[in-house]
Image: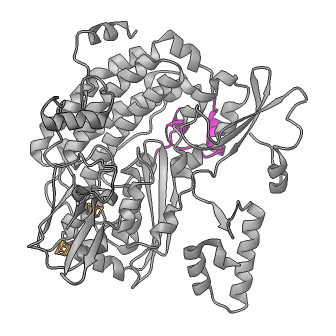
Amino acid sequence: MREKVKPEEMAEANERAPACSTCFEVPIGPIHPALKEGIRFTFWIEGERIRKVDIRPGFMHRGIEFMGTKRNLIQVLYLAERICGICSISHPLAIVQAVEQAAGIEVPPRAQYIRVIIGELERIHSHLLWAGVAAHELGFDTLLHYVWKVREPVLDLLEDLTGNRINYAIPIYGGVRRDVPPEKYPVLKNALRYYRSLVDDFVNFFLRDPSIEARTRGVGVLTREEADSLCAVGPTARASGLRKDVRQDWPYFAYPDLGVRAITPEDMGLEVQGDVYDRIVVRLLEVVQSIEIIERCLEEMPDGEIIAFPKVAALLAHLKKAEGEGIGRHEAPRGEVIHYIRLQADEEAPVVWKVKAPTYSNLMPWYPMFRDQEIADIPIVAASIDPCICCMERVQIVRGGREETLWKEQLLELSWAKTRRIVRGLGPSHVTRRASRGGADERR
Amino acid sequence: MIFKALFLQLFTRPVTNRFPAKYMPKSVLGFLAKVEEGKARLVPPVPVTEGFRGKIAYDREKCIGCQMCIRVCPARVIEFKPEEKKIRMYVARCTYCAQCVDVCPVGALARSREFLLADYDRFAPNLVVE
Ligand code: SF4
Ligand code: SF4
């Protein structure tokens, strides 16, 4: 882990002497062929080994939360869907929970099951996508093409159920927009059977392949303690032996009835090592787990309503009256995603909307993972947490055309200044309100 | 090991659909022009499913100009024409969420299965619905 340094020292870290006298400093990114998204790594390298790493995110910020505070909640829902192209149902599922909590909306049970079904289908396609990317990073393109070929049926299925391969536009506050009618069950079951039949192949191709094992065993190790103290989430945490899963720890939707248990490599009878290999194991087991969950959903799904407000106009009116705050969490394929929302009466747009994507929690675990690895392992270690940089970028301060990042000290200073303002009797409301809407400009 | 699967793959049909032609034409536009003239054959795209959310179809006669669709549209696709009390949609901005279809009180909007909408001009006749 990176030693504790003061923010201003951290800023100078790149200019300072390298971590060891024989180290070379190798910057990778923000734009680099090996990276799919913009993030900058600085590696201090001794021979072939990485001795120290620094990570600088902040190149991909899109200002989505700010845009959200300019739109009504129905529009925000589709904006949330576009935070991530792969977890394109995870963000809506988190924000609907937050808004339903804030506005006190009851969701019919059938809708809860449908949300689970689509969410788990997404997990299958996302994990398959990751498996392909991982194979590609290892130089195993045959496997990439094979995996992405077998990923097509689940996308077709999603298109059949929702109307599109990605960006399903299914959840809405108070339910789901489209039913999964009983006529569709056979198609769904067929697809599940197909994936079940592939599991053996996957075990053979990935886990029993000597070259994959040689490239991933003991590479990018994250110990259980590190995963715990650095707050890793999702498969990254579970591969280190941490039984941590929102579906298990804070069940929501239909998950309390389904009794999901977090998966670790132990479930396959392996000793937990917390390396890239274990992350493959966990994702593979999770595909099987998702298949089982969907099968159970199909059996246990009750009949009935799928939406609390069949008329969108009534929903809009209800949301406009609503006041309060809510938090929604969902176990996305990459880990826990959290949405926080604050609503105010007579206000169509949310006053505050805060998103935490799973990759945000999985950035810090990169530090121990990279330590003492070889340069050639950088791509697979970086890919092993299944990073989604765009979704993760949440803070970028632009003031007077100049981009700057707030360190902890400055944030504290801002916070103290705000307390002083309140104490001086200026009142919090208009200040917070404008600050949350207009960004830092008005804060000073 | 993967060799068995690879060997079997030799005898199965590729999953890739060779759209729009089996081999990449020198100029796609030239090829499409030839298709129009009937000199070449288009390999059709993979058909979309029954409930596909494609380009939104607008029934001008039914529309009462209530502007509800404008209120919910996340991408600000729809513009109101006050003189006629009708709407105009710029399809190039559309995200195909079909929320406008859900909200329209008179059913003037519907999702269609049309999806081949790429164009060089975002104001092409096919992309502006009135
Ligand atoms: S489909 Fe969605 S984005 Fe397109 S016009 Fe309708 S509401 Fe707007
Ligand atoms: S919601 Fe329907 S009736 Fe109202 S303006 Fe839009 S298309 Fe016309």
Q: Identify the residue shown where x is 41% and y is 44%.
A: A86
| Position of residue A84 in the picture relative to residue B25 (left or right) | right
Q: Position of residue A165 (x, y in %)?
A: 29, 43
Q: Residue furthest bottom?
A: A425
Q: Name the spot of residue A440 as percent of width and height, x first.
A: 65, 72
Task: Name the image quarter holding the N terminus of chain A.
Answer: top right
Quarter occupied by the C terminus of chain A: bottom right
Q: Nearer the viewer, residue A380 or A356?
A: A380
Does A425 appear above or below A43?
below
The residue located at (19%, 81%) in the rendering is B85
The residue sitting at 8% across, 73% down in the picture is: B61
What color scheme is it? Answer: one colour
Magenta stretch, residue numbers: A221-245
Residue A242 painted magenta? yes
Q: Is residue A39 left or right of residue B30?
A: right
Residue A292 seen from this side: no
How far from the left and from the top, in percent, is residue B17?
Answer: 24, 28
Percent x, y for residue A194? 23, 26
Q: Quadrant of residue A295?
A: top left
Q: Nearer the viewer, residue A277 or A21?
A: A21
Please check the rendered image and state whether residue B20 is part of the magenta-colored stretch, yes or no.
Answer: no
* Nearest the eye: A275 or A257: A275
Whether residue A113 is visible here, answered yes or no, is yes
Which residue is drawn at the image coordinates 81% and 50% (left, top)? A10
Ligand 2 quarter of the rendering: bottom left
Q: Nearer the viewer, residue B3 or B71?
A: B71
Q: Is residue A355 above or below residue B40?
A: below
